[in-house]
Image (tube, helix red, strand yellow):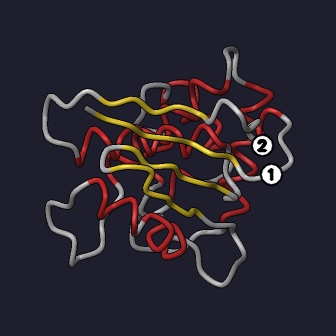
């Protein structure tokens, strides 16, 4: 439940909050476990019920999760590289006793990382999280960009393999 508030307190929370509430996610405490199925059901409903492109809502939720998600206790004031190298560990920790896919990270250069996602959530959620990790962990004022790999079709767009998202910075 640690990330539940992000589904309400995001740039599209006025629209996403009521859907989450319909699925009973307004009563989740940060320190309790909650069935992932409810999150997935709510996200599926957003896909069809929002009056605007759901991509916007998913990125907004992902950005909020990336902003508030706790890092492991041994990572105080981490670099982006440290967070990316532990992203899958943090993801797996949020889910217990389930096959929820994974996140792998490849260092392309000192300022370019490729992330590969087979997670159970919409690709745009991961995109938003990666963007927030950049804002949260890179030095203030650093210009960076997050983008889908142009040669690999994301799963949410019909791709049949993992989704690949890059982050690069100056």
Q: Position of residue 30 (x, y in %)?
A: 40, 65
User: On the rendered structure, is 80 left or right of 112?
Assistant: left
**Foreground label between 2 and 1:** 1
User: On the rendered structure, is 28 left or right of 163?
Assistant: left
The residue lying furthest to the bottom in this view is: 97
Q: Residue under label 2, please give it.
A: 155
Residue at the (56%, 42%) spot, across then down: 165
Looking at the image, residue 142 lies above or below residue 130: above
Alpha carbon separation for disc pair 2 and 1 = 7 Å
Q: Nearer the viewer, residue 132 or 153?
A: 153
Secondary structure of the residue carrying tag 2 is helix
Q: Residue under label 1, please give it.
A: 161
The residue lying furthest to the top in this view is: 52
Residue at the (66%, 84%) spot, across then down: 97
Residue at the (42%, 33%) spot, across then down: 10
Q: Position of residue 23 (x, y in %)?
A: 68, 50
Residue at the (40%, 41%) spot, across then down: 64
């Amino acid at each position: 439940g640690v990330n539940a508030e992000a589904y309400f307190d995001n740039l599209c929370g006025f629209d996403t909050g009521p859907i989450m509430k319909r699925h009973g996610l307004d009563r989740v405490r940060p320190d309790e476990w909650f069935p992932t199925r409810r999150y997935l059901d709510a996200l599926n409903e957003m896909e069809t019920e929002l009056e605007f492109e759901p991509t916007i809502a998913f990125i907004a939720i992902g950005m909020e999760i990336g902003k508030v998600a706790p890092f492991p206790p041994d990572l105080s004031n981490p670099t982006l590289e440290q967070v990316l190298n532990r992203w899958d560990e943090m993801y797996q920790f949020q889910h217990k006793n389930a096959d929820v896919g994974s996140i792998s990270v490849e260092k392309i250069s000192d300022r370019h990382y490729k992330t590969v996602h087979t997670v159970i959530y919409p690709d745009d959620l991961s995109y938003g999280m990666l963007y927030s990790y950049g804002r949260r962990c890179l030095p203030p004022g650093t210009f960076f960009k997050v983008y889908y790999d142009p040669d690999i079709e994301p799963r949410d767009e019909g791709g049949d393999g993992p989704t690949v998202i890059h982050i690069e910075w100056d």
